[in-house]
Amino acid sequence: MALRGLGRRISIGKRCFSSASEVEKPPRDGKPINLFSAINQALHIALETDPRAYVFGEDVGFGGVFRCTTGLTDRFGRNRVFNTPLCEQGIAGFAIGLAAMGNRAIAEIQFADYIYPAFDQIVNEAAKFRYRSGNQFNCGGLTIRSPYGAVGHGGHYHSQSPEAFFCHVPGLKVVIPRSPQQAKGLLLACIRDPNPVVFFEPKWLYRLAVEEVPEHDYMLPLSQAEVTRQGSDITLVGWGAQLSVLEHACDEAAKDGISCELIDLRTLIPWDKETVEASVRKTGRLLVSHEAPVTGGFGAEISASIAECCFLRHGLQLEAPVARICGLDTPFPLVYEPFYMPTKNKVLDAIKTTVNY
């Protein structure tokens, strides 16, 4: 994968209330690493550059289930990297208090499927902390990391994609990377952002996704989508591990003469509506794809927003209904996972149907 839109090392001063990130393109250096190693690099940098940063969660002290926190305890000590009880509500509540005291709390929820016990703390406390105090207090130093999505054998309780729940909550940011280089830059940006962030990591890619990642400190901008592939016939939008599926579908569509434009949303809330709208005004068609169930998924919000702004307006219009290729409206299956997933062939069929509408 090509390196795109990387940022430079920055110094961390007193937290303010701006959401702006200072980024620019750094030299194209680095070595090939996988996604969990990129997360690990980001956590090392976060702890090294800010003495107020702490990493904690279930089993993070020995490296975590996916080894993302390997070596942190040895390097930074058990006062800054430590295990917690098996209580997601307690992890989130402790993280909010730690962040409210001016620290950078980097909490891990071991699987996104188990984030629901922490829902009240995240939604009713973290998201509203700044607003309930009239901006006198905040927990903007809070980042909650959690692996999400399919893994091939996770079944009901280790495969869910709960991002849409949190996209409905003003006061939070929701970020999902597609690759190692993106994961490192976006995670560092989330940790340093003055707002609470939920950062979902596609666990399918922890070891499968490998690319060159700069070893130095850099950030990528939040709330800025990236057009990863230029096209003229249809716009495809996705995030996380689904980007790879969409890329393969674009390749197959190209064999039939269909030119696809592919957009990685990266930040779901606040999402980059302008980039998606500009693309759809060019192509006249939109397909949104994600692993989460289709009903109530964030793809529905994107579809509705684009329909509002691109339907019979300014002489540029949608030439076909917006297509959504997503997970099914069932609990995530085990042996039937291949039927549940929004696969390349499902996306390709929808591309052809939409273009030929």
Image: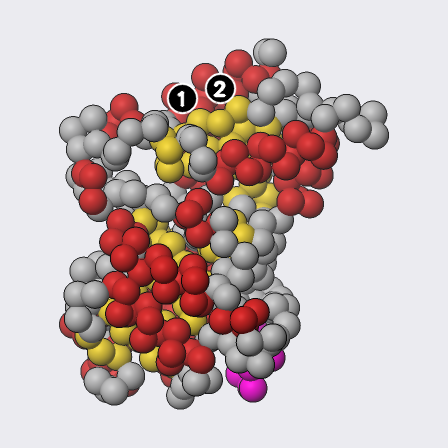
Query: Which color mode does the image show?
Result: secondary structure
The image quadrant where one finds the C terminus is: top right
As displayed, is residue 12 above or below residue 218?
Answer: below
Residue 41, image quadrant:
bottom left
Region in magenta: 8-16
At x 68%, y 38%, the residue is 277
Magenta region includes residue 243: no
Question: Label 1 near label 2: C-beta < 8 Å?
Answer: yes
Residue at the top extreme of this rendering: 356
Q: Which residue corresponds to mark 1?
A: 346
Question: Is residue 8 shown to the viewer in this render?
Answer: yes
- Direction from residue 167 to residue 150 in the image, left or right: left
Q: Is residue 49 left or right of residue 209?
A: right
Residue 87 as seen in the image, left or right of residue 162:
left
Quick check: 29 left or right of 77? right
Closer to the camera in the image, 350 or 321: 321
**Can residue 257 be seen by looking at this rendering?**
no
Q: In the rendered image, which residue does mark 2 sit on?
A: 350
Q: CA distance from mark 2 to mark 1?
A: 6 Å
Number of the label disc, if any, that sits on residue 213: none
Q: Secondary structure at mark 1?
A: helix
Q: Which kind of residue does numbered mark 1 sit on?
A: Lys
Q: Residues within 10 Å of mark 1 (few under 14, many from 20)?
A: few
Q: Nearer the viewer, residue 236 or 86?
A: 86
Q: Residues within 10 Å of mark 2 (few under 14, many from 20)?
A: some
